[in-house]
Image (cartoon, rainbow, N blue to C red):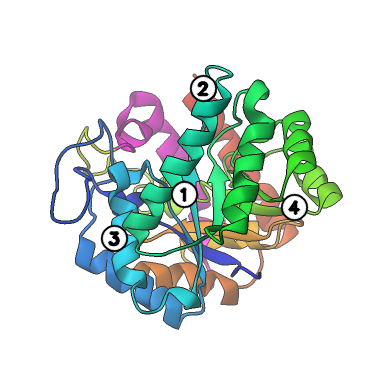
């Protein structure tokens, strides 16, 4: 199984209200504004045309809305894509039966919303309770035998727990945040190489902060948008003013988003980068990062100094 370097993350497609298609209702305290289902479907179709085969979603995005939108877009072309979705396992207690049931029921819900009979990569959104880890991976083994799950991944980075899960079953990838603002130096990439695990990068634009369109100004988004605090707090406004200095990366035809993606593309150990898009032109821009020149060592050094200063501002 080979995933595209640029993937499409569908959290923004969950929208503000969420819910399954045709039954829109408020299902979450915070979501993403700007999502239009028809445009989201077009975006997935455009991604296919551009060679993007990796789609990522979660039962939690928009209360299942992102999965239903993705399912609509994949209908009739499911075999063209590698589809990953996430489940939050039971972490609070060691009830083995409940842990198995949670995985099974979450998977069935995702299969229904995605209009498919199998998931390529089912990701644990965090580690299950230690007393249930073996049972959870055993349950996945059964689901693999049934053809409903091809592989399992984890969206967390504790080395000891990752080794444990890898020893208990078919763990193929780690998912974690990495970008110009937030950089991991905890050995996660080394661990992935040691255990022969793929790496899926999320938060590639730091929830939109690194997209560039709001550098130096307050965005026009409401308090229901999950990014609201990222852009409108006093510290965030100051940080965006600092980040405006990153515009030097756009010289030569790169967009700011492409520069941020390119930084990750050239990072050793990266398998795939999840990028958000709500319109066809946005996924075109994201994929265009593959054709832009790499950041020079001097550009990288200057950019990281700017983002480090912005991070200090955010931390107060």
In the depicted structure, whether residue 37 falls above or below residue 239: below
In the depicted structure, whether residue 23 falls above or below residue 186: below
Q: Total number of numbered labels?
A: 4
Q: Nearer the viewer, mark 3 or mark 1?
A: 3
Q: CA distance from mark 3 to mark 4?
A: 29 Å
Residue beneath the point at 47% across and 34% down: 102
Mark 3: few/some/many CA within 10 Å (<14, 14-19, 20+): many
Element under label 2?
Answer: helix
Q: CA distance from mark 3 to mark 2?
A: 37 Å
Q: Residue furthest right?
A: 194
Q: CA distance from mark 3 to mark 1?
A: 26 Å
Residue beneath the point at 55% across and 20% down: 95
Q: Which residue is mark 2?
A: 315
Q: Which residue is mark 3?
A: 69
Q: Does residue 12 appear to the left or right of 28 in the view shown?
A: right
Q: Does residue 216 appear to the left or right of 152 in the view shown?
A: left
Q: CA distance from mark 2 to mark 1?
A: 17 Å
Mark 2: few/some/many CA within 10 Å (<14, 14-19, 20+): few
Mark toward the start of the polypeptide (2 vs 1): 1
Query: Which image quarter: residue 295?
Result: bottom right
Mark toward the start of the polypeptide (3 vs 2): 3
> Where residue 226 sits in the image (x, y, percent)?
32, 36
Q: Nearer the viewer, mark 3 or mark 2?
A: 3
Q: Which mark is residue 210?
A: 1
């Amino acid at each position: 199984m080979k995933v595209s370097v640029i993937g499409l993350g569908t959290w923004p497609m969950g929208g503000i209200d969420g819910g399954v298609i045709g039954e829109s209702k408020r299902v979450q305290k915070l979501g993403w504004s700007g999502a239009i289902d028809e445009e989201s479907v077009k975006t997935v179709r455009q991604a296919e045309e551009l060679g993007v085969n990796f789609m990522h979603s979660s039962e939690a995005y928009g209360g299942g809305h992102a999965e239903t939108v993705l399912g609509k877009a994949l209908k009739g072309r499911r075999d063209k894509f590698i589809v990953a979705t996430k489940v939050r396992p039971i972490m609070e207690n060691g009830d083995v039966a409940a842990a198995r049931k949670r995985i099974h029921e979450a998977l069935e819900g995702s299969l229904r919303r995605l209009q498919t009979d199998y998931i390529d990569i089912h990701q644990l959104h965090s580690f299950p309770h230690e007393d249930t880890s073996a049972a959870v991976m055993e349950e996945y083994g059964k689901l693999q035998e049934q053809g409903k799950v091809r592989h399992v991944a984890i969206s967390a980075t504790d080395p000891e727990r990752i080794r444990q899960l890898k020893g208990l079953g078919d763990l193929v990838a780690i998912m974690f945040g990495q970008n110009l603002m937030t950089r991991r130096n905890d050995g996660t990439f080394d661990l992935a190489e040691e255990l022969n695990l793929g790496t899926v990068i999320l938060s590639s634009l730091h929830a939109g902060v690194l997209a560039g369109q709001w550098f130096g100004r307050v965005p026009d988004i409401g308090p229901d948008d999950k990014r609201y605090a990222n852009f409108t707090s006093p510290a965030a406004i100051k940080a965006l003013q600092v980040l405006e200095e990153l515009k030097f990366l756009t010289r030569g035809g790169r967009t700011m988003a492409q520069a941020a993606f390119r930084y990750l593309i050239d990072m050793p150990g990266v398998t795939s980068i999840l990028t958000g898009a709500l319109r066809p032109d946005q996924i075109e821009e994201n994929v265009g990062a593959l054709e832009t020149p790499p950041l020079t060592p001097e550009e990288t050094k200057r950019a990281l100094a700017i983002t480090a200063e912005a991070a200090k501002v955010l931390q107060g």
